[in-house]
Image (cartoon, rainbow, N blue to C red):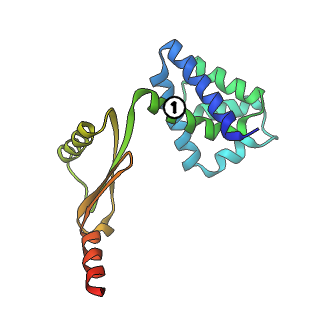
Amino acid sequence: MNTGVISVRYARALLKAACEQGIEDKVYAFMQTLAQSYLQVSDLRMTIESPMLPKEKKRKLLEVACGGDCPKLVENFFDLVLKEDREDLLQLMSNDYVTLYRKLKHIIRGKVVTATPVSAQTEDKMKEMVQSRAQGTVEFNTEVDPSIIGGFILEYDTYRMDASVKSKLNAILTQLKQ
């Protein structure tokens, strides 16, 4: 069976159970943390998938990777995944839960890249602008990339606005070469 289908089914079931209990927001935070833990700790996946590690230790490790103090629903979810020997799909399950939750709550991811750090006011204005154009809530991230020299790059949904000095200089260079 397709592993993508399996992970989505588990994530959908977790989301449904979380919604029934009214803790979908809390579970979302835990699944985001788990997904980030998989990205930041390269050995986590290998450790969780190891047949040598007892399931109880895997469960405790997963709880720590989620930030600790997990709701009972998340603990039961981990127990089920481990009982069914699906721990190799946990990273996909956490990512699928996050995706399904965002779709359910109409959350759009946005990002602005600047050459230097921006003030909280500027970040709020950018977020408001994106929220007014997009239909839903916006999760906004800011990044600093000195290589763009100046200006900014704004991305959300499928939209990308590149107002960086680097892209303008590249455009001028392309025109001069013609």
Q: Is residue 73 above or below residue 119?
A: above
For mark 1, give the secondary structure: helix
Q: Is residue 157 above or below residue 24?
A: below
**Nearer-the-camera pick, 160 or 64:** 160
- The picture quadrant where one finds residue 162 is bottom left
Q: Residue furthest front?
A: 178
**Nearer-the-camera pick, 125 or 161:** 161
Q: Quadrant of the C terminus?
A: bottom left
Residue 105 placement (x, y as % from top left): 41, 27
Residue 5 placement (x, y as % from top left): 67, 36
Q: Is residue 122 left or right of residue 138?
A: left
Q: Does the image show residue 72? A: yes
**Nearer-the-camera pick, 41 or 5:** 5
Q: Is residue 133 left or right of residue 6?
A: left
Q: Residue furthest right?
A: 52
Residue receiving disc 1: 100
Q: How many marks?
A: 1
Q: Residue at x 26, y 59 (%)?
A: 152
Q: Residue at x 63, y 23 (%)?
A: 75
